[in-house]
Amino acid sequence: MSVSASPLSLSSVVTTLRAAGCVFAEDEAALLLATAGTPAELAAMVERRVAGLPLEHVLGWAEFCGLRVHVGPGVFVPRRRTEFLVQQAVGLTPIPSVVVDLCCGSGALGAALAAALEGVELHATDVEPAAVRYARRNVGGLGKVYEGDLFAPLPDSLRGRVDVLLANVPYVPTGDVELLPAEARIHEPRVALDGGGDGLDVMRRVAAEAPRWLAPGGSLLVETSERQAARAEEAVGSGGLIPRVMTSDELYATVVIGTRPVD
C-alpha cells in the first residue's frame, strides 16, 4: 500500500528534495510516495535521499529493461545505458543457450536476458558478497549465482559451451573515480567502478580468458566509454576474438562485441 499522494504531501516532498539539489524532484517525489507504506516510512526515505543516498538504494529497486531489479546500499545500480548491451545480446543469443554474466552486480543483465528469451541456462558471478545476495534474489529460478573473481567460481563443465558472455566490467580509470558523482563514489562499491590505470584492466583479463569459455561462434559483450572504444576493441581482439564496436547515440552507450571464430 502506498502513502496517499495528497497535493500537500507531494508538494512538501518536492520542496524538500529540490532544496537538497535533486534535479528531478517531482519524479523522485512521486516514486517515493508510491513506494512508501506509511508516513513514517516516507519521512525516513526522504531523509535518506536528502542525505545523498542514490534514489534506487532508497527505493530498494531500479528499473532495468522493464524489470524491477532489487538493489541496496553497497550494490552497483544498473545504468539505463547498459540496456543497449542487453539489446545486443538478445540478437546474438541462440535458443536454447548458455549465458554467463560476469561482474553481475545485482544480476540485472543476466536476469533481463533470461526474462526476454526462452531456454536460457544462466550463470552469474561477482566478487562482492552484497552483490551476490542481491543477484540471487533477482535471478531467482532463472539461473545460478556464484561468489568469486570473474571465471574462477564457474563450473569447469561450462568451458567451451558459453554462447553469450556478458561482462559489464568496471571501466572508470583509477584517476577518474574521485571525479564521479558522490552517489556512485560514496555509495557504490569501488570494485564495481575502478578499472585500473586506463580503465581496461579487468576487461583485458576477461578478454584473455573468454575464448576458453565461449563456444565456437559464441560472443563476449563488454561495455566501455566512447573514448576507450578503440583500445577496448584492441584488447578484445588480442585474446583471439573477432571484435566489433556498437554504439547507441540515444543511450550514449558503447559496447564491444568479440566473437569466437567457428573452428
Image (cartoon, grey):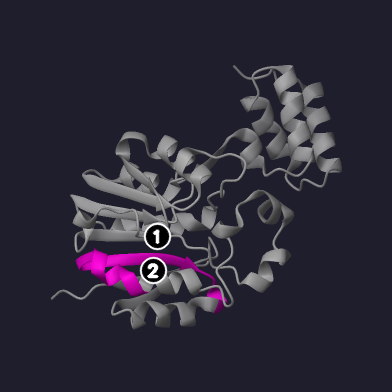
State the separation of the CA atoms marked 1 and 2: 7 Å
Q: Is residue 211 magenta?
A: yes
From the viewer's perspective, is residue 40 above or below residue 108?
Answer: above
Front residue of this view, candidates 210 and 10: 210
Rendered image quadrant of residue 164: bottom left
Residue 148's x, y, as percent?
41, 53
Question: Which quarter of the rendered picture does the C terminus lie within?
Answer: bottom left
Q: Which residue appears at 69% of the width and 62% of the height?
A: 180
Q: Which residue appears at 59% of the width and 39% of the height?
A: 72
Front residue of this view, candidates 1 and 239: 239
Residues marked 1 and 2 touching at CB (< 8 Å): yes
Tell me which numbered mark, 1 or 2, is placed earlier along the sequence: 1
Q: Counting other residues with Cα less than 10 Å from the Cα at mark 1, is it few (<14), some (14-19), or many (20 or more)?
A: many
Question: Which quarter of the rendered picture does the N terminus lie within?
Answer: top right
- Position of 47 with respect to 64 (left or right) is right
Residue 224's x, y, as percent?
50, 69
Q: Which residue appears at 71% of the width and 58% of the height?
A: 181
Q: Which residue appears at 72% of the width and 45% of the height?
A: 24
Q: Secondary structure at mark 2?
A: helix
Q: Counting other residues with Cα less than 10 Å from the Cα at mark 2, is it few (<14), some (14-19), or many (20 or more)?
A: many
From the viewer's perspective, is residue 176 above or below residue 5?
Answer: below
Q: How many marks?
A: 2
Question: Would residue 149 be visible to someone looking at this image?
Answer: yes
Residue 9's x, y, as percent?
79, 23
Q: Amino acid at mark 1?
A: Leu
The residue where tag 2 is placed is 206
Rendered image quadrant of residue 141: top left
Residue 124's x, y, as percent?
36, 50
Q: Amino acid at mark 2?
A: Val
Chain part drawn in magenta: 208-227
- Position of 154 with respect to 174 (left or right) is left
The residue where tag 1 is placed is 150
